[in-house]
Image (tube, rainbow, N blue to C red):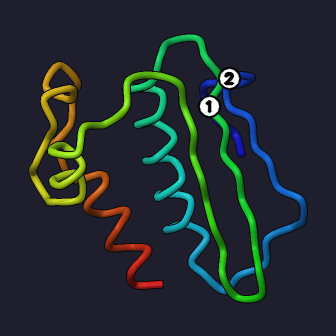
Amino acid sequence: MNFAYGERVIVVSDIAIRSNCSRKEIRRVIENLAINAVKYGAADTPITLTLEQIETHISLIIHNEGNPISSQAQSILFQQFRRTIAAEDQTGWGLGLFLAESIMEAH
């Protein structure tokens, strides 16, 4: 993955992931989640993207250091045009996670 944050992003995958998914749309999801990890995680700490595949199931885990997301904020994360208090000082429309979830559901 050609990513602007270089060595800060660590990709972990035991095997090559095989899928019939839209590469463009899955890339959009991964980029959105990784950018959120950069924006809301602790600065200058690693961000780990872990990919696993078991038969036809693919799992993507993105981990960053920083403050955990409150239960109240978690309840609105995937709603369109909704932003958490932590996101108020960041640019955006509140659509990224909504679109990422929609793409994943479509696949």
Name the residue beneath numbered marker 1.
47
Mark 2 surroundings within 10 Å by alpha-carbon count, few (fewer than 14), some (14 through 19), many (20 or more): some
Percent position of residue 3, x then y? 64, 35
**Dot placed on the residue nearer the N-terminal end, 1 or 2:** 2
Mark 1 surroundings within 10 Å by alpha-carbon count, few (fewer than 14), some (14 through 19), many (20 or more): many
86 over 55 or under it: above or below: above
Query: Where is residue 27, by image quadrant?
Result: bottom right
At label 2, the amino acid type is: Arg
**Looking at the image, which is closer to me, 53 or 94?**
53
Residue found 90% across the figure and 65% down from its top = 15
**Left or right of 94: which side holds 63?**
right
Name the residue beneath numbered marker 2.
8
Query: Where is residue 98, by image quadrant?
Result: bottom left
**Left or right of 23: which side holds 28?**
left
Residue found 62% across the figure and 31% down from its top = 47
How many numbered marks, from 0 up? 2
**Looking at the image, which is closer to me, 37 or 93?**
37
Q: Residue furthest right?
A: 15
50 over 93 or under it: above or below: below
Marks 1 and 2: CB-CB under 8 Å?
Answer: yes
Percent position of residue 57, x then y? 66, 82
Q: State the SS at label 2.
A: helix
Residue found 24% across the figure and 59% down from its top = 78
89 over 74 or under it: above or below: above
Q: State the SS at label 1.
A: strand
Percent position of residue 67, x then y? 38, 24
- CA distance separating discs 1 and 2: 6 Å
Residue found 66% across the figure and 45% down from its top = 49
